[in-house]
Amino acid sequence: MRAGVSVGTVSNVLNRPDVVSPQTRERVQAAIAQLGFVRNESARHLRAGRSRTIGLVVLDIANPFFTDVARGVEDVANPAGLAVILCNSDDRPAKEAAHLDVLAEQRVQGVLITPTAALSPNLQALRDRGTPVVLLDRRAPGPDQCAVAVDDVLGGRLAADHLLERGHRRIAFIGGSSGLPQVQERHDGVAAAVRDGTGSDDSLLVLSPATLTVAGGREAAAQIIGMPAGRRPTAAVCANDLMALGVLQEMVRHGVRVPDEFAIVGYDDIDFAAAAAVPLTSVRKPRQELGRRAAELLLDEAGDGEHQHQQPVFEPVLVVRESSMVRRSRTVAS
Amino acid sequence: MRAGVSVGTVSNVLNRPDVVSPQTRERVQAAIAQLGFVRNESARHLRAGRSRTIGLVVLDIANPFFTDVARGVEDVANPAGLAVILCNSDDRPAKEAAHLDVLAEQRVQGVLITPTAALSPNLQALRDRGTPVVLLDRRAPGPDQCAVAVDDVLGGRLAADHLLERGHRRIAFIGGSSGLPQVQERHDGVAAAVRDGTGSDDSLLVLSPATLTVAGGREAAAQIIGMPAGRRPTAAVCANDLMALGVLQEMVRHGVRVPDEFAIVGYDDIDFAAAAAVPLTSVRKPRQELGRRAAELLLDEAGDGEHQHQQPVFEPVLVVRESSMVRRSRTVAS
DNA sequence: ACACCGGTCTGAAACGTTTCACATATCTAC
DNA sequence: GTAGATATGTGAAACGTTTCAGACCGGTGT
């Protein structure tokens, strides 16, 4: 080597500086700086057996909910010296599977994932190989793994109870058709609340647009607008804020006044919910906290010590804004 | 090996299946499936010298502009078998430098980056080591590298001309204080247009909130609201849509009617701009196309063939919506 | 019978680290 | 002065691939 020293010593300088004499250390560090030497992670982790990266697979990178979660993950992973490989499955099992394969080949320390409806065999394969997997915003199917979830039944209930209190008696639940359990839970909460509140199952209309996006929301709103006035719902709980924004856009476009003629409650409480054409009432989830907690669990599981699987469930909170308020006087648009 | 075959043959089965006999191939593939064998990328690319990943460093992961760009990058990178490591610098040079170091250690094939104001020495170091770097949404300092940019001077001009046409004579430009050249260009375009349109430099008020975020927008709006009515601008061009949304929120909160009392033009035309409390006029950039183009240039540079550095500049388009329209009759809120 | 060929497979080197057993030098205590 | 301990450095093995020179084999043309 440049510094007239063996590679073993260089390794020591980098990893256990205390074990090498100050002079040598400085000499080596000078050489490193001069040569622009950068340690090769591939070699390093070929030896170590796994890399200093974790994978994060989300359903929709364009949904701010997930970027907020990602931020939480980064907050924990980066200080621990781990790089995050962020993958977007677009709620498509094939894309998800492809991403998981890549992550397996990269020998990531672990994977954080909000999976598509069915738990992919690739995910199980990953776990079988000993890679820790933490489910994000999804309950675990069994006690043998970590999962960070939100009580979505409660969330659905909060949303529906709020609308019922405001006098609404025909309520729509707008979820996607992908069969995600989170969405199913939200539906169940809404359905239970509506049943309890009205004594009837007919008060709930369930719509399942193709995607859980703004476009999906518009699609559902168009359906609602096309219904005869007598049967048309007067309010909707949406499975996420993107859809709620879509519903709002379509309603406004057709001259349906929100919330006077139609009330909307979203879910997730992304930042844009508050900035919408009509500020959205929404069910708030601790977005960054979800990511942080999941990353912490992953690090713990990937670490050397004992690991107890944990499955924390966060409680959502309803944030009431204009989109669900009965307005008394009509002032300035806002 | 399980299939009674040498490792060299396994490698051939995986990488050049045509060179191995059908029987052997099947035998090996069966063994692979049965053992759940997953090739180790670290080893593979220790040999190859670089990994099958590229790095993408953005200024603000919470800004939908960048997630749209990221989507474009993925559209190109994934089909090419490359994983994308998405990093968020938060417009902080230190975070950016740390991310670049990690990417260097990972021996990424290349880096796509929207850099902070000053070009980091770490970036130059990366290039010196032979790693291709493509600048994203930023002009190249010289001809010796690829960059994908947008004509932001033109964008600023479009925005300002639009407001001038509507009769505004006191206009604010709201940019961040981080000194990003993109923001500077937008400012220059606005300043030039205002000078041409009014014959005076005094017509332009420049505000520089701390961050290019919704919070920054609110901060700037508060400043404007605090000004005496006679000197207060009647319209603002914001350096991005997040700030425009912030301005809008703060104006609404203080009862300032938009666009009647104050007009707003944003920049980027993120999807949420159209869904805002008052739909935002904005300067549209080809977000996904920026990402795609940048990724294509990176792949070309990282490939074996000849590479010509390219520096495409996209032209932005003004999308006019309600936030800058003088309303004639006041109908329903929208 | 021979050389040669293409097709198929093997074995070993190489990639750049970490780690561990071991060598060497220096110090401490008697 | 010697034994032992401590501090510092060396050298080689190992990680799991890819790659390349060559071995082997049955067939072909002469």
Image (cartoon, coloured by chain):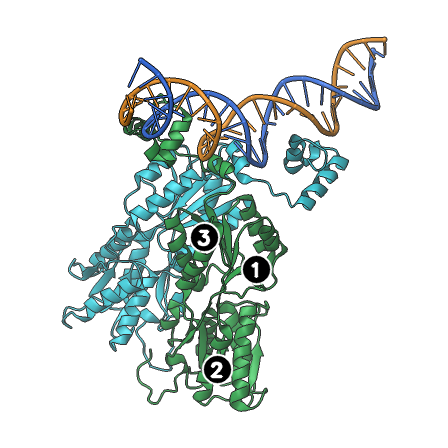
Chain colours: A green, B cyan, C orange, D blue
Of the two numbered discs 2 and 1 on the same chain, state the one appearing first in sequence: 1
Chain to which mark 2 belongs: A
C-alpha gap between disc 3 and disc 2: 37 Å
Residue linked to disc 3: A299
Same chain, marks 3 and 2?
A: yes
Looking at the image, residue A290 lies above or below residue B134: below
Label drawn at residue A160: 2
Residue A91 in percent (x, y) is at 55, 61
Residue depicted at 33% across the width and 89% down the height: A329
Residue B27, quarter of the rendered image: top right
In the structure shown, which secondary structural element does the residue marked by tag 3 occupy? helix
Identify the residue at image location x=41%, y=32%: B130
Residue nearest the viewer, comparing B174 with A95: A95
Labelled disc at residue A144: 1
Q: State which chain disc 1 sits on.
A: A
Is A201 on the left-hand or right-hand side of A112?
right
Q: Label 2's element?
A: helix
Mark 3 surroundings: few (<14), some (14-19) or many (≥20) residues within 10 A? many
Examine the rendering and report whether any part of residue B144 can be seen: no
